[in-house]
Image: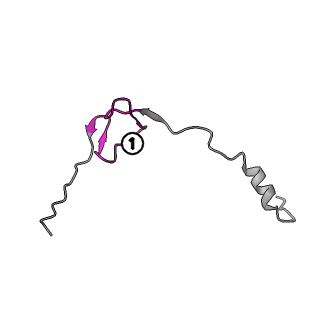
Amino acid sequence: MPLPKRRHSNQRTRKRRTHYKLTHHPAIVPSFEQPGGVTLLHHMDPSTYRYRGRQVLEIEEENPTQQ
């Protein structure tokens, strides 16, 4: 397999890489929690730990009196 004899310039490399870009948007779906809101597909709400309307993780509340 042939190898380049000389180094490619930064400009030449960057010109080639201009076509390496994201071609699709992330999957965004209507939110179950907020009417009119949107969320990423297959992601839970990080503030409430809910996914598609059901609780998936238990929220542990911190008690500041216990050290």
Give the x, y percent position of residue 50: 29, 41
User: Total marks drawn?
Assistant: 1
**The residue under label 1 is which amino acid type?**
His
> Among all residues in the image, which is located at the extreme bottom?
67
Q: Quadrant of residue 1?
A: bottom right
Give the x, y percent position of residue 40: 43, 39
Q: In which quarter of the image is the C terminus?
A: bottom left
Question: What's the residue at 81%, 56% (across, down)?
Answer: 12
Question: What's the residue at 51%, 39% (across, down)?
Answer: 26
> Among all residues in the image, which is located at the extreme right?
5
67 with respect to 27 (left or right):
left
Q: Name the residue under label 1.
A: 43
Q: Main secondary structure of the magenta part?
A: loop
Q: Is mark 1 on a helix, strand or loop?
A: loop
> Among all residues in the image, which is located at the extreme left?
65
Q: In this view, does 11 lie above or below 27?
A: below
Q: Does the magenta stretch include residue 37?
A: yes
20 with respect to 54 (left or right):
right
Range covered by the magenta-colored residues: 30-54
Q: Nearer the viewer, residue 23 or 38?
A: 38
Q: Is residue 50 magenta?
A: yes
Question: What's the residue at 55%, 38% (across, down)?
Answer: 25
Q: In which quarter of the image is residue 10?
A: bottom right
Q: Which of 34 and 26 is in front in this view?
A: 34
Give the x, y percent position of residue 5: 87, 65
Q: In this view, does 12 lie above or below 38?
A: below
Question: What's the residue at 65%, 45% (across, down)?
Answer: 21
